[in-house]
Image (spheres, grey):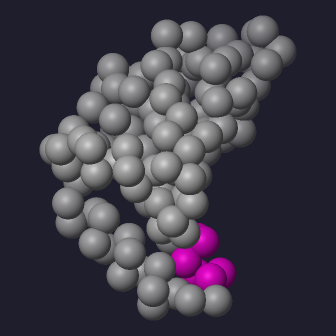
Amino acid sequence: MYVLDTNTLIYYFKETGNVAQNLFSKPPKDIGIPAISLFELEVGIAKSLAPRKRTQQLREMTSLVNIIPFGDREAKVSAAIRVKLEKQGTPIGPYDLLIGGTALAHQAILVTHNTVEFERIENLRIEDWY
């Protein structure tokens, strides 16, 4: 499964980079959006100058792909990542931590343009479709 980071979805909606080309080459059943990314996108929509357009884009996307909830498994994996990174002195942002933990909990490939931050998470597979 490919788990889409928030920035990947933003690039898709804004038609930036090669995200659409890569996304359309995958079956929708193989694509997941973490609940945390949905939260971040909803915040962005609330601040947007074009909230109707962005809401429609998001609804179209979420009707086709898997939405990955944040539950017990994702919480445990994310907590372990946070503890390890804090001990190493290399923490990452809280939402990125939860998104990375979600991808790792599902043994998925995280699709992000923010590779520097996510490379700190051991065993997390990353692709940049930008």
**Left or right: 25 in relation to 125:** left
Q: Quadrant of residue 121?
A: top right
Q: Main secondary structure of the magenta part?
A: helix
87 lies above or below 94: above
x and y percentages locating residue 72 in the rendered image = 35, 32
Furthest residue toward right: 89
- Give the residue at x 38% y 71%: 58
**Left or right: 52 in relation to 67:** right
Q: Nearer the viewer, residue 69 or 119?
A: 119
Q: Nearer the viewer, residue 98 or 8?
A: 8
100 lies above or below 124: below
x and y percentages locating residue 16 in the rendered image = 57, 60
State whether residue 6 appears in this view: no
x and y percentages locating residue 111 in the rendered image = 47, 37
x and y percentages locating residue 52 in the rendered image = 45, 90
Question: Where the N terminus falls, by quadrant?
Answer: top left
Q: Quadrant of residue 114?
A: top right
65 lies above or below 112: below
Q: Quadrant of residue 118?
A: top right
Would residue 17 be counted in the magenta stretch? no
State whether residue 104 appears in this view: yes
- Give the residue at x 49% y 49%: 18
Residue span colored magenta = 43-48
